[in-house]
């Protein structure tokens, strides 16, 4: 028996239940983890609310993308991992099939990776979603390099912080945006070259100053909604706006005038574009593994909850007070 | 003195005036053409209405992008062309600086090209806007190839027909859309592999059938507006929607859900992206020149007006009855 987080209906954090469930064996090409820690993502809140790209097929539903732990059972055909391997999960599955919140989790073998040995389990549960997501847009698609100006809205999220770190690795200029002043200092400490406080400052004017009139050529935004118009005004000629989320929960206009005059691309992007192709995923995992190993990347943990505090952990994420990853220790 | 088409205020075709104007000499790096024919483009109607990306700096304003004629004067520093050369103009300038409707036109040397000798002057005034525009999106950006499915809304425009021809050249499948049945036959004759009549047929369903469930990976649309949602539904995973115009004159939504789930790009595109870089323009001109010379491309003339019928010519373009280029002979 294991304690597993599930929900039986869409709703606020109260729908999350910690339930004693009979352990299952992994099927072919699956592995089972004894989970030591799992990381929270905005996707799980949206999934719990029924507002995510995907919905549970049936209730009750598990949830969760990122866990670190020890493999304690392997299904038929599993070749890359064995019982006892210390691994963490890659969000290369749908939450309607798999979820990792709980004491055990079964995931496909293809959604598991070793992590650098110097990382704590907390850190190990904080790497694949954030770094692979940022990698896909910034490295795989944009080939980010010195001289690039990268605008990172909602920069205090774990993916936002990962984007800041990757920009630094590549020699690009990371311009973080945050709504209020309270996170400005932490974002500068996290490596942002500039921070724009959008409630107090004019985004377009500040980007113009910072980039000396050039504009930002990469924008990496999980919010979407009407603010995309301002992002387009801040964009450089030939720039790309990656939209990797829909946090605004409002219609997103296409900035047609700016796009025509500057040849902008507005590109929907999810990590699935990397993980649905094994070669792309392998290259991405290697890139991140190597950068972690050489300590060019270091995941930032904001706070740690216990398993029976899962509701509080979700509520804390919804408060938007965190800067970095929220972890649940099992 | 030459008869020149100008307008003194924004408005319908009636604002176009045919006026006797003193000839000017070309300035440095400019050439003057004795115009033999000019081609009409939708851009000029929008410019005349004050709805184009660019506006006249002062009134009266000239207009027009595409003329064929003979160079009768060259400015200082002009090296590539001489008096007597038979050339046509490339829309590599702003209409607030230059316009070619009239008996003479001055344009920058960099906006002039020789055309294949077998073309008539009517045809010579019908090549650069349409083929270079389609080239930029389909060849330069998309590297269109056999196996691609290309959706071409407003396909009976000169740029739409050019896109159909280029798709055939590259072995791609050209799917033309048109609002009513009356142009279907002509589009099939022009080389469209399939024609979808959008007032009668379900775009997404038909694209699904034609592409065997794959969707179209290239969409080349001058309309924008709310129909972009349907285009996104018809797009293949990883597809690109090029928006190269704003004919709908209504807000364009960003198809966020489809873009996130399929990794779509929605890219604003104008020919300026090619013409503002001399190397890109030279490569594009060579590509089109060679394809015209080998008769893989052949511009389609819809109708021919006289210079004193310029208002009628504009009204005819606004009627949307044409299939191919509307030419004014001077």
Image: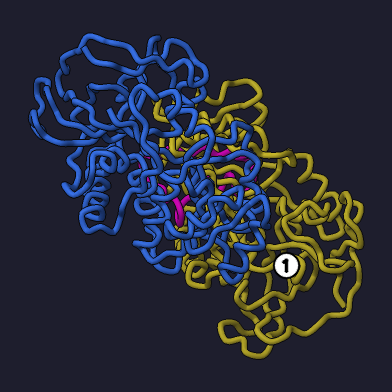
Chain colours: A blue, B yellow
Q: Quadrant of residue A200?
A: bottom right
Please name the residue shown 61% across and 49% down the image. Answer: A180
Task: Using the image, determine if residue B85 lies above or below residue A220.
Answer: below
Subunit under mark 1: B
Report if residue B45 lies within the magenta region.
no
Instruction: Left or right? Give the position of B34 relative to B121.
Output: right
Q: Residue at x 20, y 54 (%)?
A: A293
Quadrant holding the N terminus of chain B: bottom right
Which of the 4 image quadrants contains residue A294? Answer: bottom left
Q: Which residue is mark 1?
A: B36
Q: In the picture provided, is B195 more to the left or to the right than A162? A: right
Mark 1: secondary structure: strand
Task: Give A220 or A263, whichever is nearer the viewer.
Answer: A220
In this view of the protein, which residue sits in the foreground, B232 or B170?
B232
Q: Which residues are magenta?
A: B138-165
Q: Residue at left 74%, top 83%?
A: B26
- Percent coordinates x, y for residue B235 in the rendering: 48, 33
Say which of A213 and A294 sits in front: A294
Indicate whether B58 appears above or below B266.
below
* Residue B298 visible, this angle: no
- The C terminus of chain B lies in quadrant: bottom right
Q: Is residue B9 left or right of residue A254?
A: right
Q: Position of residue B229 (x, y in %)?
A: 59, 31
Q: Is residue B10 visible?
A: yes
What x and y, as percent, mark residue B77?
62, 89
Most extreme residue toward the bottom is B76
């Amino acid at each position: 028996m294991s304690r597993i987080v599930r929900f039986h209906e869409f709703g606020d954090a109260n729908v999350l239940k910690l339930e004693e469930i009979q352990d299952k064996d992994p099927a072919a090409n699956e592995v089972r983890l004894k989970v030591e820690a799992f990381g929270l993502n905005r996707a799980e809140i949206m999934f719990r609310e029924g507002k995510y790209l995907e919905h549970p097929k049936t209730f009750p539903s598990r949830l969760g993308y990122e866990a670190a732990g020890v493999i304690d059972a392997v299904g038929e055909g599993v070749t890359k991992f064995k019982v006892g391997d210390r691994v963490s999960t890659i969000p290369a599955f749908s939450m309607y099939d798999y979820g990792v919140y709980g004491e055990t989790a079964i995931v496909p073998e293809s959604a598991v990776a070793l992590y650098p040995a110097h990382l704590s389990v907390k850190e190990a549960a904080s790497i694949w979603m954030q770094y692979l997501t940022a990698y896909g847009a910034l490295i795989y698609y944009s080939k980010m390099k010195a001289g690039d100006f990268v605008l990172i809205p909602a920069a205090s999220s774990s993916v936002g912080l990962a984007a800041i770190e990757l920009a630094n690795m590549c020699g690009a200029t990371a311009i973080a945006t945050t709504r209020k002043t309270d996170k400005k200092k932490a974002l500068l400490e996290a490596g942002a070259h500039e921070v724009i406080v959008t409630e107090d400052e004019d985004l377009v004017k500040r980007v113009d100053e910072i980039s000396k009139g050039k504009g930002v050529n990469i924008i990496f935004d999980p919010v979407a909604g009407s603010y995309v118009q301002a992002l387009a005004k801040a964009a450089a000629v030939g720039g790309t706006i990656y939209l990797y989320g829909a946090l605004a929960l409002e219609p997103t206009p296409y900035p047609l005038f700016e796009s025509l005059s500057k040849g902008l691309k507005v590109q929907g992007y999810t990590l699935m574009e990397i993980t649905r192709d094994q070669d792309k995923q392998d290259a991405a995992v290697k890139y991140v593994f190597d950068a972690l190993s050489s300590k060019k990347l270091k995941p930032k943990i904001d706070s740690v909850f216990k398993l029976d505090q899962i509701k509080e952990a979700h509520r804390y994420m919804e408060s938007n007070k965190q800067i970095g990853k929220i972890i649940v220790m099992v």
